[in-house]
Amino acid sequence: VSPRRCRGTLHAVSAPTKIYLALVAALATLWAVQALVLGSGDLIYRSDAHYTLQNAHRLPAILRGRVVLRDASGADLDVPADTLQVAVRARDHDGTLAVRRVGAVDPSGVFEVASLPEGEATVSLQLGGGSVVWQVDGVALGTGLIDERLDPIALEDLLFPIRVEVVDPEGERGTSGHLVWRCQGDGTSDDLSFEGDAPIRDGVATFLATAPSVDVVTLVPGASCELFEGLWGDEEIHLAPGVTAAIRPTGQVPSDDDWTLRVALTPVRPEPAIEYDPDSLSHHGALVAAVQGGAAELPLARGGRYRVSWWALPTEGHRFQTLRVAAPNAAIEVPAGAGRHTIDVPFPMEEFARRASARR
């Protein structure tokens, strides 16, 4: 075969074949770049469910450990619920698979995190707000492996249990809400930046702090938003009356004989402003109350700017036609000062009528 004939055959490669060969070359280049990035340690730790399901066969390892808390006498303490979590960043031996998992530490101090690759991990313990209080690298992951550094993890010198009993303005001890906290001395009375949060359940907040003495701000609907400084160990605080918004619908409204109205307020910019990074406390959800006697009474944890929407419920029980209506950009300003504040809000009757007629 002559050299000219060989050259002629190569030139005769079809256009689709040339495209195919170009794609193969591109994929090979992409694979090489990806391998280089993974090999350099710039891993992306994935936590989404789809990625986990796709790689389930490569995630057989389970991480287990135990946290120990003790009081001044050396007696073991329970871990307060919803205050401590374990975060795991794990990669396989080849560096081609990386995942991030977060698990809860139960009251006995035990934690377990599944769906991890066989390889190694960085394990950290975090407060609910994300503050890292303990961390270790190079934890080996594999079937039946338990790193001795994880059992036990002694935290008595790093975390301090705080219990706050909250008495509401009526003298009752069963109130619910939230509080945010910081170590005492980390800010002035005018500084409202905080490190962690805790739920108030049945009048009690129990949490772990990074110092034995803390400042707290309570966020309880209908009670004052106050800063309490220098709380130690086991304390009791008494709340003053707070903000109540009386929302009064104005203009034309649906007939009371046919519909029951409810008002929903969703915080947009509460006042006083509190600097707390997670910004995910339950008090940021909507508060709802029925309109009775011409107004809806909503006890609030704070004043400030709120978005307004309405729920219209048919009085006939068999009519499944509950409607949510809201005027565009409907918002109100609730004074931050304590007391009952009556606020007139136009009801979006035109939008309600359109929605009601469309559902018939």
Image (cartoon, rainbow, N blue to C red):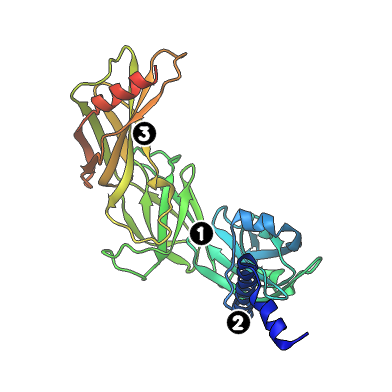
User: Residue 345 falls in which quadrant of the image?
Assistant: top left
Are discs 1 and 2 less than 8 Å apart at CB?
Answer: no
Q: Position of residue 192 (x, y in %)?
A: 31, 62
Q: Position of residue 104 (x, y in %)?
A: 61, 56
> Gap in Å between the C-alphas at discs 3 and 2?
52 Å
State which mark lies toward you, 3 or 2.
2
Q: Is residue 181 left or right of residue 335?
A: right
Residue corresponding to mark 3: 288
> Gap in Å between the C-alphas at discs 3 and 1?
27 Å
Please tell me how crowded label 2 is: few (under 14), some (14-19), or many (20+) other residues with Cα within 10 Å: few
Please tell me how crowded label 3 is: few (under 14), some (14-19), or many (20+) other residues with Cα within 10 Å: some
Q: Is residue 263 above or below residue 270?
A: above
Residue at disc 1, secondary structure: loop
Residue 128, label in figure: 1
Residue corresponding to mark 2: 40
Q: Which residue appears at 20% of the width and 34% of the height?
A: 342
Residue at disc 2, secondary structure: loop
Please tell me how crowded label 1 is: few (under 14), some (14-19), or many (20+) other residues with Cα within 10 Å: some
Amino acid carrying mark 3 in the image:
Val
Earlier in the chain: of badge 3 and badge 1, it is: 1
Q: Position of residue 68 (x, y in %)?
A: 65, 65
Would residue 104 be visible to someone looking at this image?
Answer: no
Q: Which residue appears at 37% of the width and 49% of the height?
A: 219
- Front residue of 285/98: it is 98
Q: Is residue 243 above or below residue 230?
A: above
Residue at disc 3, secondary structure: strand
Q: Which residue appears at 31% of the width and 53% of the height?
A: 226
Q: Is residue 49 left or right of residue 340?
A: right
State which mark lies toward you, 1 or 2.
2
Amino acid carrying mark 1 in the image:
Gly
Q: Position of residue 49 (x, y in %)?
A: 62, 54
Q: Is residue 304 above or below residue 86?
A: above
